[in-house]
């Protein structure tokens, strides 16, 4: 059985997956727990050192953190000869061109072999539990069989020309290694497609009892169901336990949770609940408590308590943090961190403060699971919209942008191929098939690519751009993509220049040159600490803290300035349980201070219910303080 | 024999040169120059030339571009009419050093 734990970042997918895997192993099943999130935290949750191949954790439990990059290299390495043969037979590119294309990498391509790798790792296990990446990218991963099938189709078109040539010269065609590769791709695509929809695979959706998470849950569950995948249960994590004394904070949270859970039932899935633990569950003993909670569904009795609580008064500070986040001259601010730490709320709060300071600002989401519209409590879409004076917002639609570009280039690419064919009419039908399928092939990593183009476009029209990024792993990919995309564009420019006498330089060359220049300028902007910066958002808990440490060192490697670290959702003093939680958080804050690498530390309290809409966000912004 | 070969070769070269010049003249509209400019910008993005070299190239190409644009609409450009041509003049001199 293949169990996928999917859901919003930070909801507790890793914790739930680990708890269930541990329980299965205890029950005597040989169990593999594997993470497909590029920002792994499975090792942190299990308190074990993990690698890309399954390692024994305890008893019958094994765990692995997928290294999709390496899996892709291995996969490509074994097939490189055939791929090269097809490329050189089916196109006019020479060995040198194919060489330079093969040397390139594009972030996101690794997801192409993620499922193949998963199946390879699963061999010999009774049960496989998968800890997935946050929603948006998991949906992409699950769409990979379709992409793989299209890729096979493109290769088959390329090969068709070779087959026709062989037939006309020799009178017959022999099946070769290249044909075998194409068959392999197509078989792999259809068997993965079936596996995901068989009784052998099921999905468990993990969420938090919060408004924002609920919206994402609705969208995510319906996306999974629409593609024919079986969603088995809904798990609401970190439910606030009963207060052990009068506590307005706990009351407010429980009232909000009751309201959200009631609406979650309407999704029509068995609902399970995991109460918040006094400290973040780590190691097998903590995880057992989680597994226990997952044994039986939530009784509807848990969903009571609908009294409206008194609002929690928060201390009011002035906004001196704005200088750290977006002082004068700053043009580009990224908000990033682990899923569920409050990136979107923080980014929206900062953008709002910048707008109220008097600057025109665009709040741009680069997380394929957009939620800035939900936080701003306004309809936000692919078109930029002024949500309040000077504050504009946009949630780009990568699929639509790709569609537009595809239409734009369809003619240009066809002309280019016609010219490269050099007037020979022999292979025209094959070329057309290749072109048509190639244009249909949405490349993996598409979300990052178009997010990047959206950032570039925004910088041309707004003095300040605030970017709400996808969770850590994919946010880093976006930043790395700047350099990698530039390499791609340069190779394409080289090929165009090389065949210039034959094909001429058209609109495609002009656009590519423009893109190369924009990428070069963005690269310069990113490493200029006066003009661009990355605000790391975290919570005072172990898993987010460890991911923050990795994020900060990755950003340092990329030479991107991180002037501020925002610690969000700090529990206010209240009942004795709140005080226990607060004490554990103080310990985490001390640890965060040690890893912050010189950035200013900002703190924001946990607000219940979570701030939504301009006024609530403005009030929330006034509660942020510098913690020295 | 050798002399005849050379004369023949020279003649062919001359004719080709003439044809090339005519084609050039025909293509010497602004699109041709714009393409040169684009190629120079592409080379800049590839790091093959520097900003200064690009500026120098632009300083050279842009006036020519303006000149051609000025001429357009005025007298018709000299073009090779289609039809049969008689090739004569093996003895003519031509300077092929330029390109």
Image (cartoon, helix red, strand yellow):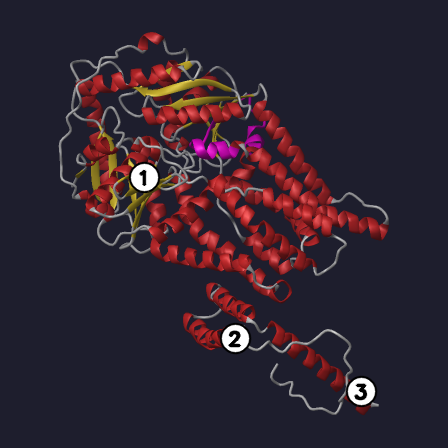
In the image, is residue A528 above or below residue B94?
A: above
Nearest to the eye among marks 3 and 1: give it. 3
Which quadrant of the structure image shows residue A468? top left
Residue in the image at 39% along x and 37% along y:
A381
Q: Earlier in the sequence, mark 3 or mark 2?
A: 3
Quadrant of the frame with the C terminus of chain A: top left
Which quadrant of the structure image shows residue A354? top left
Distance Cα–Cα, label 3 vs label 2: 40 Å
In the image, is residue A154 above or below residue A610?
A: below
User: Callout 2 environment at 10 Å: few (<14), some (14 to 19), or many (20+)?
Assistant: some
Which quadrant of the structure image shows residue B97? bottom right
Residue with the most extreme front position: B74
Nearest to the eye among marks 1 and 2: give it. 2
Query: What residue span does the magenta drawing correspond to?
Result: A117-141
Q: On the picture, is A292 further left or further right than A184?
A: left
On the image, numbered disc 1 is attached to which residue? Answer: A548
Asked whether A434 falls inside the magenta stretch, the response is no
């Amino acid at each position: 059985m293949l169990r996928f734990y999917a859901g919003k970042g930070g909801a507790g997918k890793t914790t739930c997956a680990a708890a269930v895997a541990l329980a299965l192993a205890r029950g005597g099943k040989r169990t593999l727990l594997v993470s497909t999130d590029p920002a792994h935290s499975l090792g942190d949750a299990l308190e074990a050192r993990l690698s890309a191949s399954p390692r024994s954790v305890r008893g019958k439990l094994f765990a692995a953190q997928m290294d999709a990059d390496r899996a892709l290299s291995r996969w490509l390495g074994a097939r490189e000869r055939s791929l090269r043969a097809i490329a050189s037979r089916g196109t006019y590119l020479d060995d040198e061109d194919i060489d330079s294309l093969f040397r390139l990498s594009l972030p996101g391509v690794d997801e192409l072999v993620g499922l193949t790798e998963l199946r390879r790792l699963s061999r010999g296990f009774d049960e496989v539990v998968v800890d997935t990446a946050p929603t948006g990218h998991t949906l992409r991963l699950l769409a990979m069989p379709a992409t793989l099938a299209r890729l096979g189709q493109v290769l088959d078109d390329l090969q068709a020309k070779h087959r026709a040539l062989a037939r006309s010269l020799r009178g017959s065609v022999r099946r070769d290694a290249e044909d075998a590769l194409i068959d392999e791709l197509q078989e792999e695509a259809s068997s993965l497609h079936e596996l995901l929809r068989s009784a052998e695979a099921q999905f468990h959706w993990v969420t938090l009892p919060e408004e924002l998470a609920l919206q994402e849950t609705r969208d995510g569950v319906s996306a999974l169901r629409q593609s024919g995948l079986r969603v088995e249960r809904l798990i609401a994590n970190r439910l606030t336990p009963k207060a052990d004394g009068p506590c307005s904070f706990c009351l407010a949270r429980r009232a909000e949770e009751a309201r959200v859970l009631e609406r979650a039932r309407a999704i029509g899935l068995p609902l399970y609940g995991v109460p918040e633990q006094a400290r973040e569950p780590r190691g097998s003993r903590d995880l057992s408590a989680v597994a226990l909670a997952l044994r039986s569904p939530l009784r509807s009795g848990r969903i009571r308590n609908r009294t409206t609580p008194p609002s929690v008064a928060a201390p009011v500070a002035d906004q001196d943090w704005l200088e750290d986040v977006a002082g004068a001259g700053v043009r580009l601010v990224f908000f990033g961190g682990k899923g569920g730490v409050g990136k979107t709320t923080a980014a929206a709060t900062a953008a709002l403060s910048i707008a109220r300071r008097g600057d025109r600002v665009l709040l741009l989401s680069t997380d394929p699971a957009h939620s800035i519209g939900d936080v701003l409590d306004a309809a936000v879409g692919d078109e930029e919209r002024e949500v309040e004076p000077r504050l504009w917002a946009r949630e780009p639609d990568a699929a639509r942008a790709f569609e537009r570009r595809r239409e734009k280039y369809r003619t240009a690419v066809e002309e280019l191929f016609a010219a490269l064919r050099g007037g020979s009419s022999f292979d025209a039908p094959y070329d057309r098939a290749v072109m048509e399928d190639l244009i249909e092939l949405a490349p993996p990593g598409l979300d990052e690519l178009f997010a990047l183009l959206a950032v570039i476009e925004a910088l041309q029209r707004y003095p300040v751009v605030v970017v709400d990024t996808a969770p850590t792993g994919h946010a880093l990919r976006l930043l790395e993509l700047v350099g990698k995309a530039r390499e791609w564009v340069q190779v394409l420019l080289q090929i165009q220049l090389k065949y210039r006498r034959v094909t001429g330089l058209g609109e495609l060359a002009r656009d590519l040159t423009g893109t190369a220049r924009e990428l070069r300028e963005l690269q310069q902007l990113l490493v200029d600490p006066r003009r661009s910066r990355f605000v790391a958002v975290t919570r005072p808990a172990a898993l987010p803290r460890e991911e923050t440490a990795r994020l900060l060192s990755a950003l340092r490697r990329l030479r991107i300035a991180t002037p501020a670290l925002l610690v969000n959702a700090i529990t206010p003093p209240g009942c004795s349980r709140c005080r226990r939680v607060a004490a554990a958080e103080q310990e985490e804050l001390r640890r965060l201070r040690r890893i912050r690498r010189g950035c200013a530390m900002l703190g924001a309290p946990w607000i219940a219910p979570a701030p939504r809409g301009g006024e609530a966000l403005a009030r929330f912004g006034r509660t942020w303080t510098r913690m020295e | 024999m050798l002399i005849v070969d050379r004369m023949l070769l020279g003649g062919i070269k001359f004719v080709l040169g003439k044809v090339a010049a005519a084609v050039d003249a025909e293509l010497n509209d602004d699109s041709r120059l714009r393409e040169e400019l684009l190629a120079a910008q592409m080379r800049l993005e590839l790091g093959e030339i520097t900003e200064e070299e690009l500026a120098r190239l632009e300083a050279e190409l842009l006036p020519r571009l303006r000149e051609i644009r000025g001429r357009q609409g005025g007298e018709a450009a000299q073009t090779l009419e289609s039809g049969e041509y008689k090739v004569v003049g093996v003895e003519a001199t031509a300077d092929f050093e330029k390109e």
